[in-house]
Image: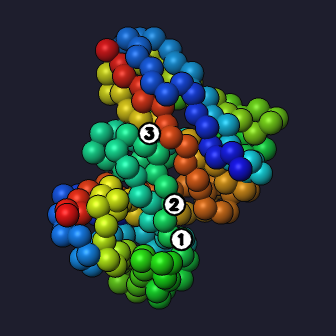
Amino acid sequence: DAGVTQSPTHLIKTRGQQVTLRCSPKSGHDTVSWYQQALGQGPQFIFQYYEEEERQRGNFPDRFSGHQFPNYSSELNVNALLLGDSALYLCASTVGVGDTQYFGPGTRLTVL
Amino acid sequence: QKEVEQDPGPLSVPEGAIVSLNCTYSNSAFQYFMWYRQYSRKGPELLMYTYSSGNKEDGRFTAQVDKSSKYISLFIRDSQPSDSATYLCAMSLFTGGGNKLTFGTGTQLKVEL
C-alpha cells in the first residue's frame, strides 16, 4: 500500500524565484492538504484540496497557490520566494474532508 | 495566545520510564485530537486519534482527552530509545467545507540507555 509521496526531496532556490512541489496521495485517498513546517515549529496549514477545488485556506499570502489534478495528485506553487519561505513542506492526504490525515516525508526548501 | 500550547522540551528520560506529554488548547470547537511522532527530518507519523473525552490505549501508548479542561495528554509506557523523536499534538476543525489541523510546537523527547 503506497503511502503519500512527495517530490523533490530537497530544493535550493534564490530569492524571487518560483518553485513547484508535487504530492501523490496515499492509495484510496482523494483529499490533499499542504503544510509548512519551519525549524523547531509545528506544521502550519496552507490549504486543502478536494474534488479539484481549494476547500480551505490558512493564513498564507497569495504567493502560495495550488492545484489538484483528476488523479488526486497535487502541486504547491510559491512565487517570489522569500528567505522566510525556507521550511519543510508537508503534504497530507485523507478520504473526503472528515478523516485523519497521513503525511508524506516532505520537501525541504532552502531559499538563499 | 496560540490556539494550541505545547511545552517544547527537550525532555530526557531513562529507558523504561513512563513519559507524559501534554497540550492545552483554547478553541472549544476542535473536534478531533491526534498525536503524531516525527523523527528528525522526516514527515509526521500518526500515533493516536480520538474524538471524545476519556482514554484510548494502543500498545504502550495511551491518549487522554479532557474537553472540559481543554487538555490532552499522551502517555508512553516502558519507553525505548527508539521512542526518541518529536511528538506533535494536533487538533482538527471542520469549517467552510474543509478540515484543517492545528498543531502544537512539538515536544522533543530523548530516551536514554
The chain under label 1 reads B
Q: Secondary structure at mark 3?
A: strand
Q: CA distance from mark 2 to mark 3?
A: 17 Å
Which amino acid is tagged 1? Tyr
In the image, residue B15 above or below residue A73: below
Q: What's the residue at 18%, 70% (across, down)?
A: B14
Q: Secondary structure at mark 1?
A: strand
Disc nearest the viewer among 2 and 3: 2
Q: Are marks 2 and 1 in contact (CB under 8 Å)?
A: yes
Q: Is residue A17 left or right of residue B19?
A: right
| Residue tagged 3 | A36
Residue B24 shows in this picture: no
Q: Label 1 crowding class (10 Å Cα cut-off): few <14, some 14-19, many 20+? A: some
Q: Residue B90: x, y in percent? A: 45, 62
Identify the mark at residue B46; answer none if there is no mark.
Answer: 2
| Residue tagged 1 | B49
Tag 3 and tag 1 share a subunit: no
In the image, residue B71 above or below residue B108: below
In the rendered view, how is the structure colored? rainbow
